[in-house]
Image: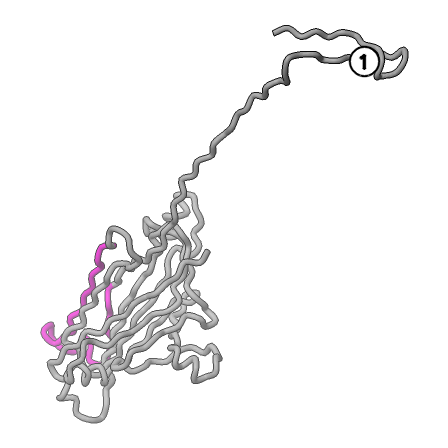
């Protein structure tokens, strides 16, 4: 298509020249666009625990022969697969327990997801009700301890926190016959966790080139079979199966 570009005098003023484009229509415009597609996926926060070897302390430990010694063992269950928030299950076995003994169960908690988080409570639940089991639990105390800069510190319960008006004091052992919630909001605060799906130690993390901070949280569960002045024959050859859950939240 051809366009004429004549020189016309007039409207622009006497003696002036103006350029006028004459044609059958206006220019067309080219268009273009860029598309940005998104693939969005959410992260995960999942706790995994590793059971340590339980230990026992008491006046008569080592005094009896092998038959008279306590039977202590632990096992660490596999992390469940598929969706869901539940971590794995740890099992501690305390057998042939003796009045006056104290049993310590080490637990290490990791964040095996992809998002950071924290452990903020530990809930204790007595075993399924039976009169005999409840009698045994009534003669025992339980506490949760957290590693605070190399020192094992008793975690207080929510009831202890209320009783002292939010003073933030350390905890004390409580009855193993009653449900308890241990709260990590004292001076040591919640136990923060960075994603650590390989369960690296600090030295392993350093060798792989990432921060060694907050890779795990260390706890101890302590059961004491109290030695009272009265007869304890009513809890001889009795079993109980209480449980504890370490509860965490993602911290964005």
Front residue (pair 146, 82): 82
Total count of labels: 1
Image coords of residue 168 (percent x, y): 47, 77
Residue found at x 33% / y 80% = 173
Specify the quadrant of the image occupied by residue 37: top left
Where is residue 192 drawn, in percent x and y?
42, 60
Residue 74 included in the magenta stretch of the image: yes
Give the residue furthest to the left. 67
Q: Secondary structure at mark 1?
A: strand
Quarter of the picture containing the N terminus is top right
Which residue is drawn at the image coordinates 41% and 58% (left, top)? Answer: 250
Q: Which image quarter: residue 2?
A: top right
Q: Nearer the viewer, residue 11 or 190?
A: 11
Q: Would residue 86 be counted in the magenta stretch? A: no
Packing grade of label 1 (10 A; few <14, some 14-19, many >=20) is few
User: What residue sits 43% from the left and 82% below the top?
Assistant: 162
Residue farthest to the bottom, as pictured: 230
Identify which residue is drawn at 48% across, 71% down. Answer: 187
In the image, 219 versus 7, the foreground residue is 7
Quarter occupied by residue 123: bottom left
**What span is colored magenta in the figure?**
53-79
Q: Nearer the viewer, residue 140 or 125?
A: 125
Residue 177 appears left or right of 163: left
* Image location (x, y in percent) of residue 53: 24, 64
**44 displayed left or right of 103:** right
Measuring from the top left, give residue 21's x and y in whole percent. Answer: 71, 13
Q: Which residue is mark 1?
A: 18
Q: How is the image coloured?
A: one colour
- The relative height of residue 22 versus residue 179 in the rendered view (above or below) is above
């Amino acid at each position: 298509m051809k366009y004429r570009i004549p020189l016309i005098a007039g409207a622009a003023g006497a003696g002036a020249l103006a350029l006028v484009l004459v044609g059958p229509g206006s220019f067309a415009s080219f268009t273009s666009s860029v598309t940005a597609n998104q693939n969005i996926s959410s992260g995960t926060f999942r706790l995994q625990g590793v059971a340590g070897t339980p230990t026992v302390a008491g006046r008569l430990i080592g005094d009896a022969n092998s038959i008279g010694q306590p039977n202590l063992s632990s096992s660490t269950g596999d992390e469940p697969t598929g969706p869901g928030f539940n971590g794995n299950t740890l099992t501690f076995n305390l057998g042939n327990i003796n009045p006056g003994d104290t049993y310590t169960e080490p637990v290490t908690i990791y964040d095996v997801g992809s998002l950071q988080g924290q452990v903020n409570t530990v809930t204790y639940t007595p075993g399924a009700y039976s009169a005999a089991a409840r009698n045994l639990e009534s003669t025992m105390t339980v506490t949760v301890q957290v590693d605070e800069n190399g020192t094992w510190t008793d975690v207080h319960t929510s009831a202890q926190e209320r009783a002292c008006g939010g003073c933030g004091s350390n905890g004390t052992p409580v009855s193993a016959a009653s449900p308890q919630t241990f709260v990590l909001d004292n001076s040591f605060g919640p136990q923060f966790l960075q994603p650590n799906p390989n369960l690296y130690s600090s030295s392993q993390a350093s060798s792989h080139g990432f921060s060694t901070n907050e890779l795990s949280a260390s706890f101890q569960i302590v059961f004491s079979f109290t030695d009272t002045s009265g007869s304890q024959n009513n809890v001889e050859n009795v079993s109980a199966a209480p449980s504890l859950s370490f509860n965490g939240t993602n911290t964005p």
